[in-house]
Amino acid sequence: MNNIDVQHINKSYGGVSALRDISLEIKPGELFGLIGPDGAGKTSLFRILTTLLLADSGSATVCGLDVTRDYKEIRHCVGYMPGRFSLYQDLTVEENLKFFATVFNTTIKENYGLIRDIYVQIEPFKNRRAGKLSGGMKQKLALSCALIHRPEVLFLDEPTTGVDPVSRVEFWNMLDRLKNEGITILVSTPYMDEASRCDRIALMRSGECLSVNTPEGIRSTYTRPLYAVHGSFMYKLLIDLRSYPDTYSCYAFGDSHHLALKDGKNDIVGLEKFIREKGYTDVTLELIRPSIEDCFMAL
Amino acid sequence: MTYSMLWHVKQKEESKSMKQFVSFVRKEFYHIFRDMRTMMILLGIPVILIIIFGYAITTEIRSVPVAVLDQSRTDITRKLVDRISASEYFNLYKMVDNMEEAQQLFRRNKVRLVIVFPVDFATSNDASIQLLADATDPNEATQITAYMSQLIMDNGNFSIANGTSDSRFSVSGSRLVPVVHLLYNPLMKGAYNFVPGVMGLILILICSMMTSVGIVKEKEMGTMEVLLVSPMKPAYIVIAKAIPYLLLSMVNIVTILVIAYFLLDVPIAGSLTLLVFISILYAFVALCLGLLVSTMADTQKSAMLVCVMVLMLPVILLSGMVFPIENMPVVLQWLSNIVPAKWYIIAVKDVMIKGLGIGSVLPEIAILTVMVAFLMLLSVKRFKIRL
């Protein structure tokens, strides 16, 4: 049986469609990622699954409970961490945790084992007001509060947005440990590089679910030859590469350009000749494996 | 499952809910106590309002500067002027020699009233006194002339009793002098009127505004989102929000009563228990109003604005606290009936000033109770269990 089951969910806000015919099936104990840019509909989907919003059409169950009919029961068994920091800023770290423990009819002691790894990192600051914590520590506290009642399903809406890279890696390590505890986790992120940390991912854009697969599976569906191109005069190079007849697409990726050639047109000699004729002397070409972002751009 | 087991489970559930509830109320107190500025305002407001109403914008007549134009220059008028300047209501600013000078004093805002004794005041049989009042503030002018007329009439009789002849004069032209007894507030003290009014205002301010702002703040900060996705019953969230403000407003009521009783000499003629009971009932109305506002407003600013415009202004304008309801256009008189503060103020005056028992405030209690029931129903229906 699936722990989260979404069937043909539609949602629109006053004519603007936020979710279009979304269907997902998430198994118990899975770490499932919703990957997509802002406005993809990730938060709307989270709110429907956490019973905060009603879908226009379609159905969804969480832990086998219907999100519309059984909303009260669902609120007992899920943990939810909204995209915005949503704890009491004028309460201390410990008071926040205690408060949420009683709200969920439990105590810190009862489930301390589950949050210990996370909480020990913020425990030195337990008498500090939550509003005065750094971004990474806020996220750790919010995660501790969402976990305090040992939920069956954990919903994390963009938990790493606005968090420094080191804390982001730490955060994903924590999710791995939670997965080993048997908690089903649905997490959303706009960062494509985090997708590979998930068991399975759904790529979303403009309210549509483009593809659902394992990160590896998604990368293997990418069949075109892909090159990372380095050189000087990067902007001019991008324009020139896009004008190459065999180019399928070319995007700037950090300090290099990712150039995809059309299917079956893997003519590296012709490409090098084209670049030389354009007057570049220091350009290097490197055949690479596609990243999730490459796959997303190609969809 | 047997009945006793069911009962046991139910009791366990209840004790858990109780724990949730207590912890929520504790959290609310943290919020209030940690925001020192708001806290100072909440506790200071009643004192400030009492001072403002009691001393600054008082409508009582005290030490009004007057000028006298005495064209007759007799003993009678001199005696009368002495009496006038000896009274606590009036101060003699100047004896003027002609009308021109009197006008000047008016224009320079030095006096609010000029008394003109005609040349034939002491000799004529139907001599009259002219009172000129600065009517830029019509209410005040009416009051000042009324006080002065009363004063002159009293002293006119006095001089007759002294056997001074030729002292018959009239102010109104009529010999019929009404004998007025002022009941309950013989000294015409403004405090008797505004203390109940301030109580009505404070309870609306704290119970409605603070509760609605408190709930809307949770929405604005996103914490409501987390609370909704928890086993906590929405009704508990709301009640827990209201309790600290209910207690705080009771502290304020006590402050007001203490200041009123000891500083402003306002009596508490009736039963204190009844007074507190009515106040709590009215506080419930205010809480329900705040709750209703919180279901409509999405930001703290709009909640505050709605409370000030829709709740506080009517308390000041339509409750009879500042402007007598009897003098309003009929439409506003009808409208004043839906202002809870009107009924509260009537009831408080009845109990506190007149010393009446529960029997005479039953209608007000009934009206306030109906209001609580209606508003509670409305806001519970409107409370969103989702975003």
Image (cartoon, rainbow, N blue to C red):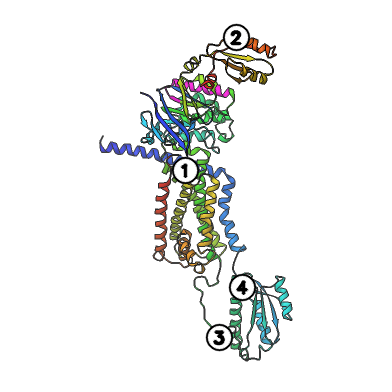
Measured Cα–Cα span from mark 4 to mark 3: 21 Å
| Image location of residue A201, percent across then percent down | 47, 22
| Image location of residue B40, percent across then percent down | 58, 49
Q: Secondary structure at mark 1?
A: helix
Quadrant in the picture for residue B108: bottom right
User: Of the numbered discs in the image, which one, if any, rests on residue B174?
Assistant: 3
Q: Is residue B288 above or below residue A223?
A: below
| Image location of residue B98, percent across then percent down | 73, 81
Q: Main secondary structure of the magenta part?
A: helix
Measured Cα–Cα span from mark 4 to mark 2: 102 Å
| Residue at mark 4 shares a chain with residue at mark 2 | no
User: Of the numbered discs in the image, which one, if any, rests on residue B339?
Assistant: none
Please report the bounds of the magenta region as a residue range.
Answer: A166-185
Identify the residue under disc 1. Answer: B25
Q: Is residue A271 above or below residue B355?
A: above
**Amino acid type at mark 1:** Val
Whether residues under marks 4 and 2 lie with C-beta atoms below 8 angstroms apart, the answer is no
